[in-house]
């Protein structure tokens, strides 16, 4: 057993050299022969120092070694150590000469955020808040093994919904006609082919559709705390401070996790077959034109659609919950979908590289697409302003609405950060806090909390995360996505 | 209330190491089989309090892989998939057969547990996936085995 004693996993990452470009941009030069491009880090001094305490920068330098990678391996202000790729990163590779890597998308394919607006104010719902939170907690399954008995889907339904996306549910009365238009990919990624998805993934997905999950996933009733760009805010349906909003953060559940896991194994064989050398097993990949790449992309698209459908179902039950408690139609309450964005995804996009337009695989792992005004992939009614960017904070802190900018096309392949990024390990957070204490603290500040697991509350304590406001500041200062509105929670529902 | 996940009860079996985002496990064994069994126990201790999971139902699990890292990945993944799709929690593991050649590994195990019951079993956190990140398979002195791996949660 020659592998024994090889303790690769324990090797301390080497020192990663850095060059300062300005206060918010740092460059990792091509310090290793295997790096095809440099690394580009978007962070202020404090965020950068945090990245230097784990393997984030080293992983960024590893990503720069992917065949066919263009311009830079990018790490965003919320970047932290992931598996193979750092979380909070972007890599674009040539569509034919480059590779696609499941690790560049991650296990929770299309983990993402959906934001609903309303025409309610804090005063309208303050007294209803505990009942509202309880009703949503009951209507939206969260935590281990929970599900809605009334949403039963057959194997063939599962295949259909992963091909049809959001409209599968809208046609069955779970949603409004206009919902799909306000989703990335219009709630349905093309090229989804369930034949490329294993039965194990389907089996896991069957029982988990329409469930929130646990960990950092949440549902929040929020209010608009401050508007920074009133023209854009108004276009997005964010009309005044104090307005009630609802944010849903979850992904593709076991279905997506299994698709990633299955194709990671496929790619491990592919790198041998195509003689690709990668510095980390989790960076396993296949040439863009190979059958393995083609199959992964079709399976990933199924998981992307699964996640869109998952958030659509949850949103429908949120609308129902408001109706049950406030005794008014969701239409009358103005519970419109503002936008739904993916944070973990690979896309085929056109980007300008050295003056020519190239077709590329854009891997966004813990990154939000941030397309500028006028881009054809921005919904028609938002096109004059740009694409809404939704960045959730940690539990009990602010979340943000930003808008995409041309700068993002120039610097980050049309992308920005996706969240706060952890500061403390889960075990450290649990040693420091316990669930009951966190709940009391949140409730003292007027936030109503419902959670399936008190442990998760301690692990997700806001002090365990970097400050999302700092992350957003960097995005805003660099200009890749700029501030539109800050939202603060009134109620938190967690798995 | 004490939710300490790595108390004395698991001493010598496994411990949880520091990692910012996820669950970082180190499992021990006097043999590779025992280390694999303890790795599985650590994964379920992440999900629930295994002390409350009665070894009531028995299942047989067989996994194959091309190397010992992939085998550890597949072993944990198979248990995770069974847990999710059958609504089961497991608390006892026994590897009964270990066959290896130059380029293939195959293990068969008996695993015991019971159906998840929200009122009986503590919910800690769901495990999304097993990863290869920082994975270590190591023989220490006196033939003891150490495994390290990260669970994505």
Image (cartoon, rainbow, N blue to C red):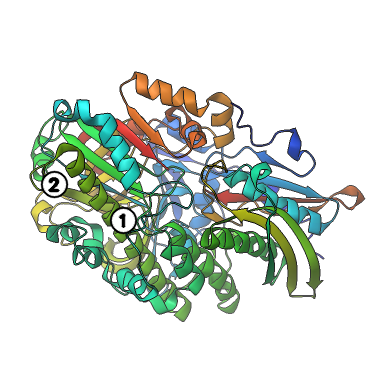
Q: Quadrant of the N terminus of chain A?
A: bottom right
Residue A136, image x and y in percent? 30, 42
- Name the secondary structure under disc 1: loop
Going by the image, does A402 lie left or right of A85? Answer: left
Q: Residue at x 47, y 57 (%)?
A: A107
Q: Is residue A88 visible?
A: yes
Name the residue beneath numbered marker 2: A330
Going by the image, does A247 lie left or right of A70? Answer: left
Going by the image, does A384 lie left or right of A267? Answer: left
- The mark nearer the N terminus, 1 or 2, is 2
Marks 1 and 2 belong to one chain? yes
> Which disc, if any, is residue B119?
none
Residue A133, image x and y in percent? 30, 36
- Name the secondary structure under disc 2: loop
User: Relative to B36, does residue A80 appear above or below in the rendering?
Assistant: above
Residue B94, image x and y in percent? 77, 59
**Mark 2, residues whose alpha carbon is within 10 Å: few (<14), some, or many (≥20)?**
some
> Which disc, if any, is residue A413?
1
Q: Residue at x 16, y 28 (%)?
A: A242
Name the image quarter holding residue A122: top left
Cα gap from disc 1 to disc 2, whole angstroms = 37 Å
User: Relative to A321, does residue A5 appear above or below in the rendering?
Assistant: below
């Amino acid at each position: 057993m020659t592998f024994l004693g090889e303790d690769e996993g324990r090797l301390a990452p080497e020192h990663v050299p850095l060059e300062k470009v300005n206060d918010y941009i740092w460059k990792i030069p091509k310090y290793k022969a295997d790096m095809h491009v440099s690394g580009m880090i978007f962070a202020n001094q404090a965020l950068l120092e945090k990245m230097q305490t784990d393997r984030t920068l080293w992983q960024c330098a590893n990503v720069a070694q992917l065949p066919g990678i263009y311009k830079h391996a990018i790490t965003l202000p919320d970047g932290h150590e992931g598996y193979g790729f750092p979380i909070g990163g972007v890599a674009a590779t040539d569509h034919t000469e480059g590779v696609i890597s499941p690790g560049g998308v991650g296990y929770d394919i299309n983990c993402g955020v959906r934001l609903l607006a309303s025409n309610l104010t804090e005063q309208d719902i303050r007294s209803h808040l505990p009942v509202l939170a309880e009703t949503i907690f009951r209507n939206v399954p969260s935590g281990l093994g929970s599900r809605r008995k009334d949403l039963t889907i057959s194997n063939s339904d599962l295949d259909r919904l992963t091909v049809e996306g959001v409209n599968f549910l809208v046609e069955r009365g779970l949603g409004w006609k206009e919902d799909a238009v306000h989703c990335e990919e219009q709630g349905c990624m093309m090229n989804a082919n369930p034949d490329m998805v294993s039965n194990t993934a389907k089996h896991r997905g069957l029982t988990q559709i329409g469930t929130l999950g646990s960990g950092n996933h949440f549902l929040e009733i929020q209010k608009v705390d401050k508007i920074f760009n009133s023209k854009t805010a108004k276009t997005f349906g964010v009309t005044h401070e104090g307005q009630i909003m609802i944010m849903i953060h979850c992904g593709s559940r076991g279905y997506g996790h299994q698709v990633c896991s299955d194709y990671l194994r496929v790619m491990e064989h592919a790198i041998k077959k195509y003689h690709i050398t990668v510095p980390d097993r989790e960076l396993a990949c296949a040439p863009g034109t190979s059958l393995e790449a083609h199959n992964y992309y079709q399976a990933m698209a199924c998981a992307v659609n699964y996640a869109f459908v998952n958030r659509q179902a949850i949103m429908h039950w949120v609308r129902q919950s408001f109706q049950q408690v406030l005794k008014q139609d969701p239409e009358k309450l103005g519970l419109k979908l503002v936008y739904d964005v993916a944070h973990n995804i690979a896309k085929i996009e056109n980007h300008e590289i050295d003056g020519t337009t190239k077709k590329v695989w854009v891997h966004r792992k813990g990154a939000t697409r941030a397309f500028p005004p006028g881009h054809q992939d921005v919904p028609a009614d938002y096109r004059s302003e740009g694409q809404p960017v939704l960045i959730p904070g940690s539990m009990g802190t602010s979340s943000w609405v930003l808008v995409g900018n041309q700068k993002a096309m120039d610097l980050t392949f049309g992308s920005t950060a996706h969240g706060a990024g952890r500061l403390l390990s889960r075990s450290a957070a649990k040693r420091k806090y316990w669930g009951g204490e966190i709940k009391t603290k949140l409730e003292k500040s007027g936030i109503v909390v419902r959670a399936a697991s008190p442990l998760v509350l301690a692990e997700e304590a806001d002090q365990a995360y970097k400050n999302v406001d700092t992350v957003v500041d960097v995005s805003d200062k660099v200009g890749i996505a700029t501030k539109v509105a800050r939202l603060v929670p009134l109620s938190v529902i967690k798995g | 209330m004490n939710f300490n996940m790595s108390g004395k009860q698991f001493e010598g079996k496994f411990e949880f190491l520091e990692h910012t985002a996820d669950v970082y496990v180190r499992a021990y064994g006097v043999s590779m089989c025992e280390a694999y069994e303890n790795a599985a126990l650590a994964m379920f201790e992440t999900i629930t309090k295994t002390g409350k999971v009665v070894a009531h139902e028995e299942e047989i699990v067989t996994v194959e892989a091309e190397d010992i890292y992939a085998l550890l990945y597949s072993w944990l993944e198979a248990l995770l998939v069974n847990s999710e799709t059958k609504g089961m929690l497991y608390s006892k593991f026994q590897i009964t057969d270990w066959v290896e050649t130059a380029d293939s590994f195959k293990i068969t195990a008996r695993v015991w547990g019971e159906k998840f019951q929200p009122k009986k079993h503590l919910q800690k956190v769901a495990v999304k996936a097993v990863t290869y990140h920082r994975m270590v398979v190591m023989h220490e002195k006196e033939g003891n085995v150490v495994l390290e791996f990260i669970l994505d949660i």
